[in-house]
């Protein structure tokens, strides 16, 4: 169970102050992305499931309270108040797998302000990261245009836990397998993998290496052919396939060089050898733009392994996510700073054929529109069973099929913009004026 | 204890094949970074301690073996062999905190090839990530030029565990505190934090918010002054400091706008109010280049909070690390691919006043040179006690003091290049020729 100390000190300071002052009014915080990074036309919501688990189990353990008292100087009164804290609030959220845009709440939480504040760091961290990766991986899906994709990122993700989230997020957007064994076990994913160059090198010859591997895994052999000379490697693989009489699930893997030219060369050699069923697998520092170029060029590649650059979302390793107070004690609030203005109140997003509208939560659903946020927790309990990865994958496929062309574009995407409803616009103006007055600026 | 399934499927395939064939000869793998990303003049070694813990505890648990047999089809013989596997090899490594360059081994592992192969994914992941972050954060240290730095990255690191590693890596290179409470507890770090804009907004006025916070934390108050109007906020903080008679550990925090101009304005107002002891803290999307500009411009900022862009190393979120077989069964090996050539054999790095030399491990230490790699495990056991973060910090400070000017440069750094010793060069040539012969290319 994640610890309640998975938070920034200032959250604890603020919570302590609120509790000491009896400020137990309800606050609503909205978690959203202010703007998309360059190179992104849309986002894919991810990370909700672990957040709900965190909220359900939220509590301070005795050793944690001891640390807060002994090392950080929190008072006994505060520690007593912390000891009793649970998350008993409401959560509305966009289900995992759905496509969202800038300024659309991914999650809104309503709870007494102390606890709503304490969970900020964890929620922001998990949703920001997993949404970042799902969004990057979704672009690979578009690029691959029906070809298989395998998550190869484990060795270079930002930590071991990050690799688990990457395997899950890539599966959510339709990757067919992962190389990550623990993630496959944890999330019930298909796992894929062959051999490394070191395997080939540890035998006296490439052919002996290939024959050994194929003997040991006769029903799932993919030959890594580029340790010495790639097209020679293909011919060696063909010899071994013939000599051992292999027929099932065969492939060769290209991991370096000009993948387009090598794939064409390899395909030709394989076809001439009467082996059209031997698949060509390509990997080696690929991202979605590389995959897109190879697919558009017509390179005869059946499956792509994508690793590091997707697993860390190398061109945009984070999104500009925030967790903003939008209502306190029944009163809508917003942040005034010119460059970081936010909209007040509890929200909903209506999706229609004319695009998305961010509105207040209690506005009526316009005809032909669908609300994106659904209640996922009430009074600290989930409103329904855990949503499966399969459900998320299905939601993603449906949303992807309806995504506008500009958003799908891989180089220079044009993200659609959600508009604000008139009611929300009006409220924002009123609240802004009130707050400026209060701040003595007007 | 980390699971032995924290690995890629291909490692298990290869290990199973080696074990089945009785290939239990010793292999040496070398983990190093092939080239530095643009914007890096040096790297800081980090991640070794968790890797040693992983190696010490390496074993397959019964439920893991059940998964490998039932879901992935590994044979009973293989499962029996996996059950007995332990890491009983030797490890040489560069201690955490030391500055290293491209092509210098961070770690070399010698063990029977199956187990040496199985641990690749974990070692690469952890060392790549932690070295990436320590190297980015070290640039902040140079930029801050003696001013305090606080790790604010938790909310946007790539997962919660990544935040722990970021707190540790930033402390290693001299950050004075972290906002991450769990990391502070785990690694015994100083923790820092104030209030958020939402705190200010949840009171009827900024002044009431400031007074409440200062009443609750009279000995450690930093006022967040930019919720409404920054310089007005500074004046409000001054009023509250006077009215409550505060004197200790006071500060104001600027989190938006033109930090240079606002810091000067705030400093002037504070000094005129007779409060030169109130510190100015700046944050808000900063990286080392921003900090450098502010420090060089003479902005009167005492401490910087740096977050996301350091916590994900936004401009270079990974380094080009590899784990290469360099010796097998007493025979030096290398990878042939033109663009990815590696050097054979167990290595050492000699550091002298004329720079670094990558040599074979058994070459004599040249006069006046220091070897960077030290033995850290023998026969699967640590050679000494756990190295502390304090030791790593000390090593970093010493190496930083000797870092060449070009490597320290923040925009456009010039990374020094390690040369290869004559003996290593000669061996590389010989092995290359032998392998080309073997591959039938010569």
Image (cartoon, coloured by chain):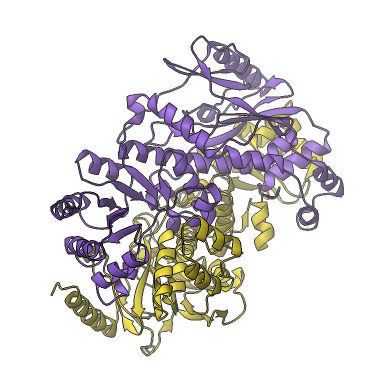
Chain colours: A yellow, B purple
Residue B103 position within the rendered picture, expressed as x and y whole percent measured from the top left: 51, 27
| Picture quadrant where residue A340 is located | bottom left
Give the percent coordinates (x, y) of residue B82: 80, 44
Q: Residue at x 24, y 41 (%)?
A: B295
Q: Residue at x 51, y 43 (%)?
A: B129
Q: Is residue B333 visible?
A: yes
Q: Can residue A272 be seen in this view?
A: no
* Residue in the foreground of this view, choosing between A153 and A432: A432
In the image, residue B316 above or below residue B218: above
On the image, the x and y values in percent for residue A304 come to 56, 50
Q: Is residue A424 above or below residue B412?
A: below
In the image, A382 versus A133, the foreground residue is A382
Residue A123 x %, y %? 48, 66
Q: Viewer-proximal residue, A306 or B383?
A: B383
Farthest residue, direction front: B245
Picture mark count: 0
Q: In which quarter of the image is residue A441?
A: bottom left
Q: For this rendering, which residue is in front, B280 or B291?
A: B280
Q: Could you tell me which residue is drawn at 13 percent across and 53 percent down?
A: B272
Q: Is residue B131 left or right of residue B276?
A: right
């Amino acid at each position: 169970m994640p610890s309640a100390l998975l938070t920034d000190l200032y959250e604890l300071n603020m919570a302590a102050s609120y509790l000491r002052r009896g400020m137990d009014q309800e606050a609503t915080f909205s978690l959203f992305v202010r703007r998309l990074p360059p190179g992104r036309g849309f986002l894919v919501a991810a990370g909700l499931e672990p957040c709900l688990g965190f909220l359900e189990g939220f509590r301070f353990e005795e050793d944690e309270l001891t640390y807060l008292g002994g090392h950080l100087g929190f008072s006994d009164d505060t520690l007593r108040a912390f000891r009793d804290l649970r998350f008993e609030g409401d959560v509305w959220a966009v289900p995992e797998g759905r496509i969202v845009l800038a300024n659309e709440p991914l999650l809104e939480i309503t709870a007494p302000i102390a606890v709503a504040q304490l969970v900020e760091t964890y929620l922001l961290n998990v949703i920001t990261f997993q949404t970042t990766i799902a969004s990057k991986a979704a672009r690979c899906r578009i690029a691959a245009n029906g070809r298989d994709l395998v998550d190869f990122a484990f060795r270079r993700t930002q930590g071991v836990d990050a690799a688990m989230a990457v395997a899950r997020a890539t599966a959510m957007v339709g990757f067919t397998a992962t190389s990550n064994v623990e993630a496959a076990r944890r999330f019930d994913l298909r796992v894929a993998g062959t051999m490394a160059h070191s395997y080939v090198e540890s035998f006296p010859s490439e052919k002996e290496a290939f024959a050994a591997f194929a003997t040991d895994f006769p029903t799932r052999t993919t030959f890594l052919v580029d340790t010495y000379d790639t097209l020679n490697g293909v011919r060696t693989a063909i010899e071994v396939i013939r000599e051992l009489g292999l027929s099932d699930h065969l492939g060769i893997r290209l991991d370096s060089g000009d993948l387009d030219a090598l794939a064409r060369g390899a395909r030709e050699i394989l076809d001439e050898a009467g082996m059209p069923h031997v698949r060509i697998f390509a990997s080696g520092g690929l991202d979605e733009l590389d995959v897109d170029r190879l697919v558009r060029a017509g390179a005869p590649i059946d499956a792509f392994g994508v690793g590091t650059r997707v697993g860390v979302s190398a061109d945009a390793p984070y999104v500009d996510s925030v967790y903003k107070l939008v209502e306190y004690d029944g009163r809508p609030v917003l942040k005034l700073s010119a460059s970081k203005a936010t909209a007040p109140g509890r929200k909903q997003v209506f999706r229609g054929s004319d695009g998305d509208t961010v509105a207040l939560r209690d506005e009526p659903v316009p005809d032909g529109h669908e609300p994106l946020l659904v209640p996922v927790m009430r009074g600290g309990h989930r409103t329904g069973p855990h949503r499966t990865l399969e459900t998320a994958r299905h939601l993603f496929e449906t949303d992807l099929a309806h995504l506008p062309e500009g958003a799908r574009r891989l180089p220079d995407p044009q993200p659609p913009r959600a508009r604000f409803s008139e009611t929300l616009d009006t409220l924002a103006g009123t609240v802004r004026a009130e707050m400026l007055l209060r701040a003595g600026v007007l």
